[in-house]
Image (cartoon, grey):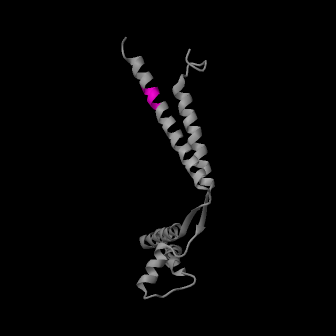
Amino acid sequence: MKPGGTEGGTAPFIAGLGLTLTALGLYLLFDSVHVVSGGMGLISQWLIGHSGGWESTSRGIIFVPLLLGVGLLFYDAKTRIGWGLLWVGLAVIVVEILSRLQFMFSMKTSHLLLILGMTAAGIGLMLRGLREDKLAERRKSDPP
């Protein structure tokens, strides 16, 4: 019988404790992050930079490839250029949205250090549990 009264041993307990600490630390970290939309996205900045300072309030031009692709696909669903414009248009919109996101922390430095320390300790305990599990397997396979 192993420590803890089961045949499982200490490695699964340590790995489980590490997983719990890591999950709690990451939850607290992600719970403290506020996501807001910033100024211009990557593609909007590129368009303004190449157009000599032209600035639009809507930046609706990023929808043009998507709309052209949808129009072509309604005309002929087998056209490759229609599918290409559709996927390029979707990719442009996703890149534009993701490049506008800004992440902000709203916590004290002491809380941040505690959260990062908890997460690092949990990762360390999970790795230790894996190492002890491998050592136990190696001891079983080695002849006495």
100 w.r.t. 56: above or below? above
Quarter the C terminus occupies: top left
Q: Nearer the viewer, residue 89 or 19?
A: 19
Q: What residue appears at the point 56 percent right and 43 percent down from the top-left corner?
A: 118
Residue range corresponding to the magenta coloring: 130-134
The residue at the far left in this view is: 143
Residue 32, position in %: x, y?
Answer: 62, 56
Residue 3, position in %: x, y?
Answer: 57, 19
Q: What residue appears at the point 47 percent right and 78 percent down from the top-left corner?
A: 45
Q: Quadrant of residue 51?
A: bottom left
Residue 141 colored in magenta in the image: no
Q: In which quarter of the image is residue 105?
A: bottom right
Residue 5, position in %: x, y?
Answer: 61, 18
Q: Which of 26 and 49 is in front in this view?
A: 26
8 w.r.t. 126: above or below? above
Residue 91, position in %: x, y?
Answer: 48, 68
Q: What residue appears at the point 58 percent right and 43 percent down from the top-left corner?
A: 23
Prevailing secondary structure class for the magenta stretch in the rendered image: helix
